[in-house]
Structures are given as structure tokens and as C-alpha cells.
Image (tube, helix red, strand yellow):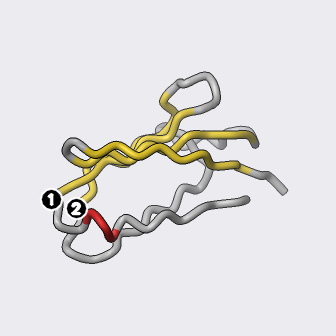
Amino acid sequence: RYMSVYPISHISHLPSASIKIYDITGRLVRSFSPLTVNNKRSTIIWDGTDNWGRHLPAGVYFVRLECLDLAVIRKAVLIKE
């Protein structure tokens, strides 16, 4: 599996954030919400499962970080061995 780590320390002054993962069709498959950012880096590890614990297929996914009026979207590739 391939996982990317995107540091969010530049928004550490904000109280909370949410991370949502969408498949290539735009369907929400996993959400991590809310996350507390306590003036230090926070790490989320996605194990390739959806909100119900089912393993998702290999492919392209989009990770959306939302924090107050900030939204960042990054592409992620899930690779199965």
C-alpha cells in the first residue's frame, strides 16, 4: 500500500480539522472528523478501508483537509500487493 503524509503543522494554530477521502467518482468513502490539532503535528494513517471497515480497491483517491475556511485537496494512490 502507498500512503502519503502531508504535514499540517502550518495550520496548528487552528482548533480542529477534518479529513475526508473520496473515490475517483467523488463518493465519500472515509472520514476522520473532527481532529484536534494541539499546536503540533497531527498524523492520520489511512489503512485503505471505508467508514464501515471494508477494504477498498486499489486506485486513485482524493484526500480533503478542511479547517475553518481552509480546504486542501491532494491525490493519493492506493496500491494493493
* 12 vs 48, nearest the viewer: 12
To which residue does mark 1 refer? Answer: 15
Residue that sits furthest to the bottom in the current view? 40
- Residue type highlighted by circle 1: Pro
Badge 2 element: strand
Q: Give the percent coordinates (x, y) of residue 1.
A: 73, 59
In the picture, measured across the screen, residue 53 lies left or right of residue 70, that is right
**Crowdedness of circle 1 by 10 Å Cα count: few (<14), some, many (20+)?**
some
Q: In front: 71, or 2?
A: 71
Looking at the image, which residue is at 62% across and 40% down? 61
- Measured as percent of width and height from the top left, residue 11 is found at 27, 63
Circle 2 residue: 36
| Point 47% across, 39% down: residue | 51
Residue 65 locus on image (x, y percent): 38, 48
State if disc 2 and disc 1 touch (CB < 8 Å): yes
Q: Nearer the viewer, mark 1 or mark 2?
A: 1
Above or below for 48 versus 62? below
Give me the residue at 43% from left, 68% from top. 7
